[in-house]
Image: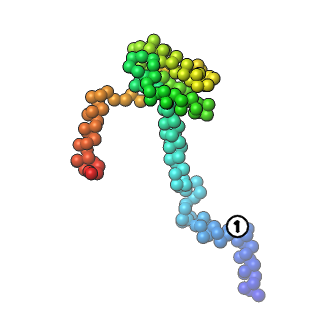
Amino acid sequence: MNRYRIFIFLLLALSVVGCSRRDMDMGLIGKNTRLGPQHDRPFPLGAATDAFWETQQTNAEAADFVFYDHEFVGNEAALAPGAKKKIMQVALRLEHVPFPVVVEQSQHNRRPQLDAMRRRTVVEQLARLGVEDAERRVVIAPNFAEGFSATEGEAAYYRGLDSRQDGGGTQN
């Protein structure tokens, strides 16, 4: 009879406290718990970096809508052959994204008339392909990344080759 009363007492005590076997197994009870206090637990795997990667992905997608200086023929407003393919891809995707179409501004804004003519070419081509708000969506802006001059690019290339021989990478 005594054992029966102790068992009932423990059962009632545990139900009042709200403790369950699952909480004990998961280490959620006591000071020295396996996971620690709820506010001090680590984030689920990838949760802290997901926002960063999504931002990187969005920035990369926005860069698809930039028409760079090298995508025009010389110092003219005519599109180069590769840019003609690109403008078709932009026209197809433009209604599904919030990004503007950017025509790269000439270096140090030295040729604003050329930039305006290139913008006009892009607007006309997009309108020809059925983009209704092309006039509003096409802007002239500086490039997002500065880029390299030919001399800087060559130096970076050779630095990359040298670092592979110094143990900075694998050699083939």
Considering only vertical position in the picture, is 26 above or below 5? above
Task: Tell me residue 58's x, y (percent).
Answer: 53, 37
Instruction: Name the outermost residue toward the top.
Output: 113
Task: Tell me residue 126's x, y (percent).
Answer: 56, 24
Give the position of the N terminus as an image quadrant.
bottom right
Secondary structure, mark 1, is: helix
Is 134 positioned to the left or the right of 2 in the image? Answer: left
Query: In the image, what residue occupies the spot 27% across and 51% down?
Result: 172
Query: In the image, what residue occupies the spot 72% across and 72% down?
Result: 13
Query: Residue 104 appears in which quarter of the rendering?
Result: top left
Instruction: Name the outermost residue toward the bottom.
Output: 1
Task: Tell me residue 19's x, y (percent).
Answer: 67, 68
Q: Specify whether residue 57 is in view.
A: yes
Query: Residue 90 appears in which quarter of the rendering?
Result: top right
Query: In the image, what residue occupies the spot 70% across and 66% down?
Result: 18
| Tag 1: amino acid | Val
Query: Residue 163 appears in which quarter of the rendering?
Result: top left
Closest to the observer, 60 or 69 = 69
Query: In the image, what residue occupies the spot 44% across and 14% down?
Result: 114
Closest to the observer, 86 or 68 = 86
Task: Tell me residue 137's x, y (percent).
Answer: 57, 23
Is 127 positioned to the left or the right of 107 in the image? Answer: right
Is 4 positioned to the left or the right of 170 in the image? Answer: right
Considering only vertical position in the picture, is 28 above or below 48? below
Coloring scheme of the render?
Answer: rainbow
Count of number-bearing discs: 1
Q: Specify whether residue 134 is in view.
A: no
At label 1, counting other C-alpha atoms closer than 10 Å, the crowd grade (few under 14, some 14-19, many 20 or more) is few
> Label 1 belongs to which residue?
17
Is 100 positioned to the left or the right of 158 in the image? Answer: right
